[in-house]
Amino acid sequence: MTKKPADSKAMRSRIVGSKPPAETARAKLRSTTPDAVSVSLTVNGARHAQAIDPRTTLLDLLREHLDLTGTKKGCDHGQCGACTVLVDGRRINSCLTFAAMYDGAQITTVEGLAKDGALHPVQKAFIDHDAFQCGYCTPGQICSAVGLMAEGRARTADEIRELMSGNICRCGAYTNIIAAIQQAMERS
Amino acid sequence: MIGFQYARAADVADAVRRMIGDPTAKLVAGGTNLIDLMKMDVERPTTVIDINRLPLTEVEEIAGGGLRIGALVRNTDLAYHPAVEKRYPVLASAIMAGASPQLRNMASTGGNLLQRTRCHYFYDTVTPCNKREPGSGCSAIDGHNRMHAILGASDACIAVHPSDMCVALALLDAEVRVAGVSGERMIAFADFHRLPGDTPQRDTNLGADEIITSVELPPRGFASNYTYLKIRDRLSYAFALVSVAVGLDLDGGIITEGRCALGGVAHKPWRDHEAEAVLRGQPADAATFARAAEMLLRGAQGYAHNAFKIELARRCILRAFAQAARGTPQSQSSKKIV
């Protein structure tokens, strides 16, 4: 995280011609030093206990603390879906949640989907249908598809498209992604 | 993001106590809006109180035929709840029209009511914004205001409330149960959110010491004749330019009760009781709906980039009434508008 000089907001305000921030706003710029929070999570079957800065998102805990870099940071604002993981079987955006909020939870990331050396049916289907190009969104797409299948609400291609709308693919592999998910649904 | 102390509330009273002790504290439930705003430096709480362990996760029947929705019921669970799907399908439909599955799995009922506007200037801390920094000015009035309000705005703020779910809750005359220092109270949905006036920094009438504990639905659910029609810049996962919730009770083609709530057009979900009075006792036909639409939009005002919304809203209202009267509500998966 970049630390800003204390007067940066005042400077920026002058640039855009608005009035300088009031004393209360300046006081609000002061950051408190957070106390560490103890968090215990089970990730892909392995238990991890950590004392972390409460600002740590679940995504950053996975990537930066546990070295599970399969889960990707795309927009970091819940708009792209690259950070999708399963918490107690439900798909969520790991970037928009503090890890401390999921103390005691079971997390599954893309690294935890294959079992005994065999790919998860959704992983296999993504390969069969060439459902990616650059691959950056793929871990999120796959975790999201696993969550979608567990929800059991999607039947038609329209429904799959709508219920995968939280995962952006800038390469535009959507046609093959839908085909892959249909295959995984048929075979499960 | 500034540093903050993290605390877990043990129960509702504990959450209230912690809020009184720290006026800069924020409650976190799903976190889907608060954490985003904290990353943008728009929200700067010194304490974040996690309320996810409070026992507010149930959907329960209430005496007289209504439904009580715990403040921590997740959007997905509410939309897929059998009683909501069967008796309040307009609420299920509106929820499914909003956000993405991942966000709906996280977002709570109470948090949905408290989400902030997505006005770009509110998010952009280098520009003036009366909602973010009272008295600094409104950048949207003479700026990029394509997404902004056409009804109920003020010289201080033309932001819109972003929720889809709240549009349906407004239509259903929901009530919000809140707890604070002096006990519990109920707030009618129409009184929960505020118009901007000269205090746009206040989105709601919730007290600083108060926490939403549930949202309660009265029995009338418009299960046969309803729709939620949402128009946006892409087919899914975008905020509304205009959305319309309609509920009709019909008796042989005559409207006995007709309601309409608009989203994406004002600082709160927009209801107009005079416009709805026009419907009562009238045939459910195009002429009746046109009169109601005209009434609903009689005070509409456009700005440089959003004047199109007035005509868009009029056409959406007509279409939504027609969908509801026919009993063919808008599908939220097939995007075809019929």
Image (spheres, grey):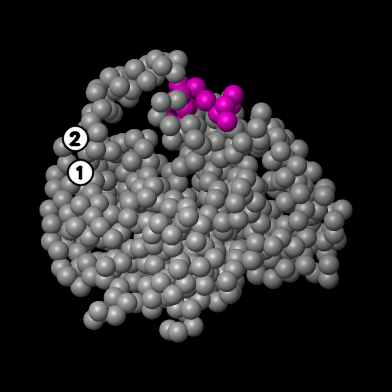
Q: Position of residue B228 (x, y in %)?
A: 64, 59
**Quadrant hosting residue A3:** top left
- Amino acid marked by disc 2: Thr
Residues at discs 2 and 1 in contact (Cβ within 8 Å) = yes
B274 versus A130 height, above or below: above
Picture residue at 23% right of the left edge, 81% below the top: A116
Q: Dot 2 falls on which chain? A: A
- The magenta segment: B128-144
Whether residue A9 appears in this view of the structure is yes
Subunit ID for the residue under disc 1? B
Residue B143 is covered by the magenta coloring: yes
The C terminus of chain A appears in which quarter of the rendering?
Answer: bottom left
Q: Which residue is mark 1?
A: B5
Crowding at label 2, few (<14), some or many (≥20) Cα neighbours within 10 Å? few
> Seen in the image, is A108 located left or right of residue B158?
left
Residue B42, x across and y down, in percent: 37, 35
Quadrant (top left/top right/bottom left/bottom right) for the N terminus of chain A: top left
**Magenta stretch, overall SS:** loop
Magenta stretch holds residue A159: no
Q: Nearer the viewer, residue B137 or A16?
A: A16
Residue B256 seen: no
- At 17% across and 47% down in the image, what residue appears? A53
SS assignment at label 1? strand
Residue at (85, 56) in percent of width and height: B286
Q: Are marks 2 and 1 on the same chain?
A: no
Q: Position of residue A60 (x, y in %)?
A: 25, 52
Q: In this view of the protein, which residue sits in the foreground, B176 or A112?
A: A112
Residue A32's mark?
2
Judged from the image, the secondary structure of the residue bearing numbered disc 2 is loop
